[in-house]
Amino acid sequence: MTLLDVKNVSIEYTTEAGVLKAVDDVSFSLEVGESVGLVGESGCGKTTLAKSIMRLLAKNGSVSTGQMLFKGEDLVTKSDEEIRQLRLNEIAMVSQSAMNALNPVYTVGDQLVEGIMTHTKMTKKEATDRAIEVFRMVGLEAKRLKSFPHQMSGGMKQRAIIAMALTLNPSLIIADEPTTALDVVVQDRILQQIIQIQKEINSSMILITHDISVVSETCETIIVMYGGKVMEKAPTRIFFKTPAHPYSLGLNNAFPSIHEIGEELISIPGAPPNLMDEQNGCRFQERCPFKTETCETKVPELEEVAPGHFSACHYNDQVESFREACKKRETWELVRDRMIEERKRGVS
Ligand SMILES: Nc1ncnc2c1ncn2[C@@H]1O[C@H](COP(=O)(O)OP(=O)(O)OP(=O)(O)O)[C@@H](O)[C@H]1O
């Protein structure tokens, strides 16, 4: 059963310098209980997309086209009050910035119990029992409920935030880089806990990260975004065996855990496009080793390259040779040389 159906959504920010199209015609759906990893470099629109689902975009941002059907109803046209209710009962967001939401003058337990009582008809005793239960779920001892935020480590605070987000068994968890500021061991443990809880309460999850190796261990589906567009979408297991889009092939080189130990990392030269500029053709063309004239003028559509596996490249039929070429450092060095050449030509 489909929980969330995002259809042709575009999101814009109005700035003094003009309109920035942060998300451009993005579609994907999420089944009940499914977890999707949204990946891509910084600035590709992941957070914007996630915040728009919760209607938490900055004041200058808005959904310009498209629908976001949650349980069949369009979030884009719902009233503020309806969205507030959904945020309380159905959709939970866990993000790094949420850590700052803990009030320093109350114990974490008081904040958690208060939150549960506000959103349910539970008595104080029932709410306290539930708080103890969710604390256990995230690996915190009950006595930690008596701590003030400053008495907890970063990892503990993050667990407390996750506990708060999960108390009401949300149908959808949006986790935006939930563990980035924590050390790697703690990150891994907390992520595993989020996944375990998500499975226990059969929530769906959107996990946002710039690190694709995190998705390999946690999500059933992966969506790769670049410059505000979806470049590739696939079942995670298939993606990591046979990635298709040249951008994904580049990302794969840049993340260590899916590589043989000892293999050197190769990064993609250059940076994502400035979304203030008018975008023509493929967004990835500037950094793509296989760019042709077609890529400069024609926007590639997402094409199904295998069952359930989509890639937005004009040359999906050449993916096998692309895969081989992308493993080689020279391939990317040539891109760097080409970019330098193009820049020189642009200046002269
Ligand atoms: N309030 C805003 N006003 C103008 N532009 C914005 C605003 N918020 C984000 N942007 C721009 O929108 C684009 C997408 O940003 P977004 O934060 O969604 O990307 P992201 O992939 O989540 O990156 P990160 O991982 O760094 O959060 C970027 O070009 C960013 O500079």
Image (cartoon, rainbow, N blue to C red):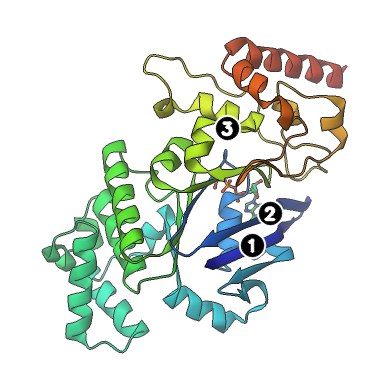
Secondary structure of the residue carrying tag 1 is strand
Alpha carbon distance from label 3 to label 2: 20 Å
Q: Nearer the viewer, residue 287 or 58?
A: 287
Discs 1, 3 touching: Cβ within 8 Å: no
N-terminal of the pair, mark 1 or mark 3, is 1
Q: Amino acid at mark 1?
A: Val
Tell me the number on the disc at residue 298. Answer: none
Tag 3: amino acid: Pro
Q: Residue 58, located in which quarter of the rendered image?
A: bottom right
N-term-proximal mark, 3 vs 2: 2
Q: Which quadrant of the figure has residue 196?
A: bottom left
- Label 2 with label 1: CB-CB less than 8 Å: yes
Query: From the viewer's perspective, is 200 left or right of 306?
Result: left
Q: Residue at x 20, y 69 (%)?
A: 133
Q: Tell me which amino acid carries mark 2.
A: Val
Q: Position of residue 280 (x, y in %)?
A: 84, 39
Residue at 28%, 79% in the rendered image: 114
Q: Residue at x 55, y 77 (%)?
A: 83
Compare marks 2 and 1 and give the one earlier in the sequence: 1
Q: Nearer the viewer, residue 228 or 347?
A: 228
The circle drawn on residue 26 is 2
Mark 2: secondary structure: strand
Picture coordinates of residue 245, whole percent (x, y): 65, 33
What residue does disc 3 label?
243
262 or 93, which lies in front?
262
Q: Is residue 191 above or below residue 336?
A: below
Q: Which mark is residue 6?
A: 1
Does the CB distance between marks 3 and 2 fall below 8 Å?
A: no
Residues 267 and 98: in front is 267
